[in-house]
Structures are given as structure tokens and as C-alpha cells.
Amino acid sequence: MIDEREDLIRRVTEAQRGLGRAFAHLQSPLFTSNLTMRQLKVVLLLSVRGSLSGQDLAHDLGVGLGTVTGIVDRLVSHGLVSRHEDPNDRRVRRVELTAAGTRLIEEINDAGLQHIRRIMEHLDLDTLRALDFVTRRLQEVAEELHRS
């Protein structure tokens, strides 16, 4: 049973890697944005968590506050994030996405969804039903793990 479980997990992860390689060949704002990996991580963190302090970003990225300052400076110059004073503590500066940053995240997400939708349109109904079940179950387990 354990060998079968490991074999199935390996096969699924290999298929996911293959999908990732297939998507890498497609045009996506993810690959054309000219952002560094750390800049992209900041934009993604802000899209999920909203407004964050520099200290929060430093902790989440595993870097020093000086490094975060440079990353945020470049994102501000790109017009993707803004800084503002924390209303509860004027000593703290918070960073959040601008409308352009939000649009970039939406474009990245939409491009990925369009690619996966194009693939799914070629699947039969039974396969789509199975994929729906598995995808929902993956989401449930991910949410359970996140809560614990």
C-alpha cells in the first residue's frame, strides 16, 4: 500500500511538472513582467495577505529589512505597490498593491486559468467529473492543513 501511495504521488507530481513545462512555453504576464523572483513574491504575498509592514515582508521572505526596502523601492518605481503610514502605529510603514499591482496579479491568474481551461475543454465529462472531485478534495485538505 505504501509503495503504491508513493508511486501515485510521484506520478502526479511528475504530471504537474510536465504541465508546468507546457505552461512555461505560453505567453503569460508571469514571464513577461520583468520582475525578479523576490519582487514577484512580494506582489503575490500582498495579493493574498493585503497590506503588510516591512517587518512582516522581511519575515515572510526570510531576508533583512534593508533588503525589503530595496525590493519595495523598485516595486514602487514600477507603480505596483505603495507605502503608507499604519493608522494604528505611525512608526510603521505598510505596503500594499496599487491598482496596477492588482491588475498584474489578475492578469497572471487569468492567463493561467485560460491555459488550464483550454486543456480541460478537451476532456470528456467523466474525466472532468473526476477532476472536479479531486480538485475540491485537494482544496479541502489544503485548507485543513492551513488551519492546523
Image (tube, grey):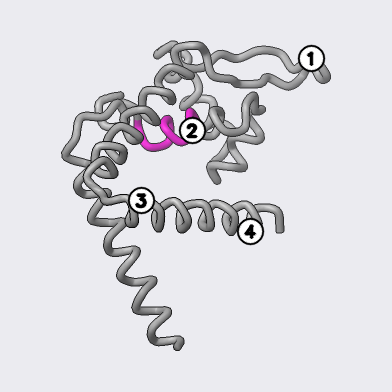
Magenta region, main secondary structure: helix
Three-letter amino acid code of the residue under disc 3: Leu
Q: Is residue 115 left or right of residue 76?
A: left
Q: What element carries label 3?
A: helix
Number of the label disc, if any, that sits on residue 145: 4
**Closer to the observer: label 4 or label 3?**
3
**Closer to the observer: label 1 or label 3?**
3
The answer to whether marks 3 and 2 mark residues whose Cβ atoms lie closer than 8 Å is no
* Image-quadrant location for residue 6: bottom left
Q: Position of residue 122 (x, y in %)?
A: 22, 45
Q: What element carries label 1?
A: loop
Question: Which residue is tagged 3?
Answer: 128
Part of the protein shown in magenta: 36-44
The answer to whether marks 4 and 3 mark residues whose Cβ atoms lie closer than 8 Å is no
Question: Which residue is tagged 1?
Answer: 87
Earlier along the polypeptide chain: callout 1 or callout 4?
A: 1
Q: Is residue 75 above or below residue 56?
A: above
Q: Is residue 123 left or right of residue 2?
A: left
Q: Residues within 10 Å of mark 4 (few under 14, many from 20)?
A: few
Earlier along the polypeptide chain: callout 4 or callout 3?
A: 3
Q: In this view, does 67 lie above or below 132?
A: above
* Image-quadrant location for residue 108: top left
The residue at 43%/17% (across/down) is 103
Q: Is mark 4 on a helix, strand or loop?
A: helix
Three-letter amino acid code of the residue under disc 4: Leu
Number of the label disc, if any, that sits on residue 44: 2
Label 2 to label 1, Cα distance in Å? 23 Å
